[in-house]
Image (cartoon, rainbow, N blue to C red):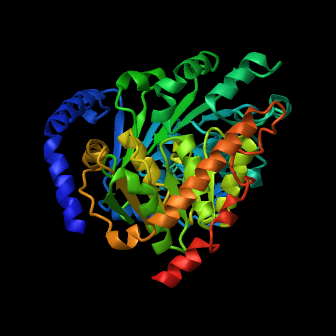
Amino acid sequence: MADQREASVDQEKKNTKTVEKENNTQKTEEKNNSLTPEDDSNTTDNETQDDTNTEETHKSFRDLGVTEVLCEACDLLGWKKPTKIQIEAIPVALEGRDVIGLAETGSGKTGAFALPILQCLLASAQRLHSLILTPTRELAFQIAEQFDALGSSIGVKTAVVVGGIDMMSQALVLAKKPHVVIATPGRLIDHLENTKGFNLRALKYLVMDEADRILNMDFESEVDKILKVIPRDRRTFLFSATMTKKVQKLQRAALQDPVKCTVSSKYATVDKLQQYYIFIPSKYKDCYLVSILNELAGNSFMVFCGTCNNAQRVALLLRNLGITAIPLHGQMSQNKRLGALNKFKSKSRSVLLATDVASRGLDIPHVDCVINFDIPTHSKDYIHRVGRTARAGRSGKSITFVTQYDVELFQRIEALIGKKLPAFPTQEEEVMMLLERVSEAQRFARIEMKESSEKRKRPKADEDAADDGEQSSGVRKKIKGGSFRGRAKRGR
Ligand SMILES: Nc1ncnc2c1ncn2[C@@H]1O[C@H](COP(=O)(O)OP(=O)(O)OP(=O)(O)O)[C@@H](O)[C@H]1O
């Protein structure tokens, strides 16, 4: 069966040769714009290929110049020795240079920029000293937690400034003049324009985490506005697992003589990540998902969907089958988003159905498996999505659903990561045995989606009432036989 699917993929690959050619042209163009040593003469390079410099991995935080109190903080977090990106970036940052840090997902980039900032604060404490820009709200909270954990013994105060939360309470926190502000660009602009007494005119450090995303068009006007109201004379750090290839975009960040700290080969995924694809007809995606979740039961899954609607629908569908699933997407209120994340983090839900709002930066160590239910349309998102598992030296698995419509996108992903992925083994007959129950659950999920959309239209609807579907009508009880998982296992 797997052979058949591989043959189909091969056939599709043949059919899309022209597209491949076009992609190659596009790739060449991108390469010409890329920030490689030959096209970036203004950057000093600090490159470490994986496993080439074993001597360096014996270095300690002290060897990098990290001060005693911060070494102790690392120790308390269980960080025995610095990671490769920390070895590359921390000494350069401590020297006062601008840094472009490119290292794989889960490799400790947050520590690589947080420690030098905290050390600078320790030397000369100053309010509103550093600004960390991140693309998503959840990531902002996570970065603040890391600053708090590393900086608690030196009394560092942080503030998270993100959308979806009351402006007034954030203004009060900003009025207390924290040392480090961690913000999403839009809400920060709101405060810069409307919160009396708040400005960043004395800022010393600007960090763009997930820098390629921050420098993307979506944030263009916000970032330009922010750059206009912070001092030119500052240090700037850009960090990500994938960096923008457009030199112009990097120039917008106004770096001064930056050092590029690159760890491992470009866009490599982590070694301990087992990556698979599964070639299936689009109409059976739900069925295959249920089958895989059932087969790998006991694991924690992040399942990525292309739209908020699909994340919501699939979460409802899975719940109707007795699987503890919860959605996380941009159409949910911020309360519900954080609630969903916490339920997943605390393992009270085993499946998180997410859009790309959760693809970057989130550090949830127990994620065992990432499923790309809808293939990412931007290949770089693939790297970030699968990077939610196999973090900090752990192992993990990813399975990407490839339908008859996705072959071209899949080929681009394989080209980007420089690997041919193996097919995930499945038994089609067994999967098809689930079809009837999955179809019933799909029907109920559609009813629940309709109900919650009507609820939202009602004038006095509580905005939180239906947006994660946990309070939906409970039609799953109507599916005969109760929990799917129990029955499925008995049937195996
Ligand atoms: N020196 C270290 N030793 C052990 N663990 C570390 C070390 N530095 C960071 N970590 C841990 O590694 C995990 C991943 O770190 P972090 O979230 O900073 O990764 P990242 O490189 O920013 O990933 P992403 O590209 O996905 O944003 C975190 O749980 C962090 O606490």
**Nearer to us in this view, 201 or 305:** 305
Where's the C terminus, which quadrant?
bottom left
Q: In which quarter of the image is ligand 1?
A: bottom right
In the depicted structure, whether residue 165 falls above or below residue 432: above
Residue 106: image x %, image y %?
49, 55
Residue at 70% of width from left, 35% of height from top? 162
**Nearer to us in this view, 171 or 338:** 338
Residue at 50% of width from left, 55% of height from top? 303
In the depicted structure, whether residue 439 falls above or below residue 333: below
- 89 relative to 131 in the view: left or right: left
**Nearer to us in this view, 165 or 314:** 314
Residue 40, picture quadrant: top left
Residue 121, picture quadrant: top right
- 148 relative to 235 in the view: left or right: right
Count every numbered label the image shows and give the total: 0
Residue at 48% of width from left, 34% of height from top? 213
